[in-house]
């Protein structure tokens, strides 16, 4: 049995020892609904966790100022997992057992989300708005898990289509050697297989490290025309700098999880030409009411400019509030799940999302952007 399998088995065993409160009592009082957010508030992925928190908190603070949902304010409890699966398990169990949260929200990362999935299933606690595109959270559908963003398969398809349109004949993958990296690697292989191609070469690095040189050396030897990069912003910034310094001319692209603003900041002007797939519209769009509302809320409640990550936090929070509102005053977890599954054409503000019993992914669209003169601009 692998270490992860043992850890998951222990987590399930711990769940079975916990008292299971009735739905109507868990995390709900006459005037409050308690939600638990466990994600990276420290470490090399902290910009993602902090961005999700800023966007979501702006929405929850605003609704609380206006009387809450059916007279109940949203209480958002936050714990730091440092983007490590063990900590995600510990903090999630604490949220459920000690804090008695009604639902979970805004997790960040594939390895951490996969680690808590058995707990969520066993305890039947809704988990909404995860900052990951992993297929394991989408198929087969886990009744308690509701994804807002497009999948990594969707993002990989968009990147491969772009690479080939630009004349690339071979594609390599540089990836974080864990569930996240392997999820995007799998999506890339699927996209290439559909075109009668295969991954030309790979390079890897270890999560929460900056050890990118060996993986870079493997790709320099292979010289692919294009490279899909998979990781958090700090190691990918290091990879991009080293790649350019060593004369690697491959087209470079990465998925939305990188955190565009964080990557641009870490590169400090060295990232021009890098493609980033996005799962939310550009934050500067003026023609989408939901984006305009998020821009105003995030600035008013946090002082931050709207970016891709806090916009995703904002939109995910709006989805959660939509489900809570539809579930009604007589709230329980089962009613929240049923309400979310009923949101088949729910308008967030010129952005329509859809869930069903067989599909727990709200958005399917991917937007391609590129770093140009230190700015992230839309190219599709």
Image: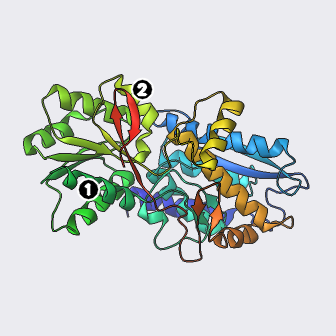
Q: Crowding at label 1, few (<14), some or many (≥20) Cα neighbours within 10 Å?
A: many
Residue displayed at 54% across by 64% down: 118
User: Is residue 78 shown above or below 130?
Assistant: above
- Whether residue 101 appears in this view of the structure is yes
Task: Tell me the mark number nearer the camera, choosing from 1 and 2.
Answer: 1
User: Does the CB distance between marks 1 and 2 fall below 8 Å?
Assistant: no
Measured in 3D between alpha carbons, the distance from the residue under mark 1 to the one under mark 2, in whole angstroms, is 26 Å
- Which structural element holds mark 1? helix
Q: Quadrant of the N terminus?
A: bottom left
**Whether residue 82 can be seen here:** no
Q: Which residue extends farthest bottom?
A: 358
Count of labels shown?
2
Residue under label 2, please give it.
Answer: 265
Mark 2 residue crowding within 10 angstroms, few (<14) / some (14–19) / many (20+): some
The residue lying at 77 percent from left, 42 percent from top is 62
Q: Residue at x 83, y 50 (%)?
A: 68
Residue placed under numbered mark 1 in the picture: 160
Farthest residue, direction left: 221
Tag on residue 32?
Answer: none
Q: Is residue 355 left or right of residue 238?
A: right
> Element at badge 2?
helix
| Foreground of the two, 105 or 224 | 224
Q: Nearer the viewer, residue 337 or 355?
A: 355
Return the x and y of residue 324 as percentages of the image width and height: 75, 61
Chain-order first, disc 1 or disc 2:
1
Quarter where residue 194 is shown: bottom left
Front in this rendered view, residue 135 or 89: 135
């Amino acid at each position: 049995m692998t270490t992860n399998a043992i850890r998951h088995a222990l987590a399930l065993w711990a769940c079975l020892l916990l008292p299971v409160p009735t739905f109507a009592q868990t995390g709900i009082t006459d005037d409050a609904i308690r939600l638990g957010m466990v994600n990276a508030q420290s470490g090399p992925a902290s910009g993602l966790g902090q961005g999700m928190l800023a966007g979501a908190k702006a929405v929850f603070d605003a609704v609380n100022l206006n009387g809450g949902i059916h007279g109940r304010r949203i209480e958002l409890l936050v714990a730091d997992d440092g983007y490590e699966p063990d900590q995600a398990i510990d903090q999630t169990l604490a949220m459920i057992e000690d804090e008695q949260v009604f639902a979970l929200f805004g997790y960040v990362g594939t390895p951490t989300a996969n680690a808590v999935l058995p707990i969520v299933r066993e305890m039947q606690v809704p988990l909404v708005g995860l900052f990951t595109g992993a297929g394991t959270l989408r198929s087969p559908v886990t009744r308690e898990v509701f994804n807002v963003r497009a999948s990594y398969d969707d993002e990989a398809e968009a990147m491969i289509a772009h690479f080939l349109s630009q004349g690339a004949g071979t594609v390599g993958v540089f990836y974080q050697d864990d569930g996240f990296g392997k999820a995007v690697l799998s999506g890339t292989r699927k996209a290439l297989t559909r075109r009668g191609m295969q991954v030309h070469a790979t390079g890897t690095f270890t999560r929460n490290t900056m050890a990118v040189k060996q993986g870079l050396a493997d790709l320099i030897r292979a010289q692919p025309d294009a490279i899909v990069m998979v990781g958090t912003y700090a190691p990918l910034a290091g990879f991009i700098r080293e790649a350019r310094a060593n004369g690697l001319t491959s087209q470079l692209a990465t998925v939305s999880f990188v955190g565009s603003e964080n990557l641009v900041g870490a590169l400090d002007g060295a990232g021009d030409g890098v493609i980033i797939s996005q799962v939310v519209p550009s934050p500067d769009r003026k023609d989408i009411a939901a984006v305009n509302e998020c821009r105003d809320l995030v600035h008013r409640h946090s002082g931050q400019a709207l970016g891709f990550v806090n916009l995703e936090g904002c939109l995910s929070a709006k989805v959660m509030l939509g489900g809570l509102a539809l579930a009604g005053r007589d709230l329980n977890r089962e009613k929240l799940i049923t309400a979310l599954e009923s949101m088949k054409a729910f308008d967030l503000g010129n952005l329509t999302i859809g869930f069903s019993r067989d599909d727990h992914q709200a958005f399917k669209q991917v937007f391609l952007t590129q770093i140009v003169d230190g700015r992230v601009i839309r190219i599709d």
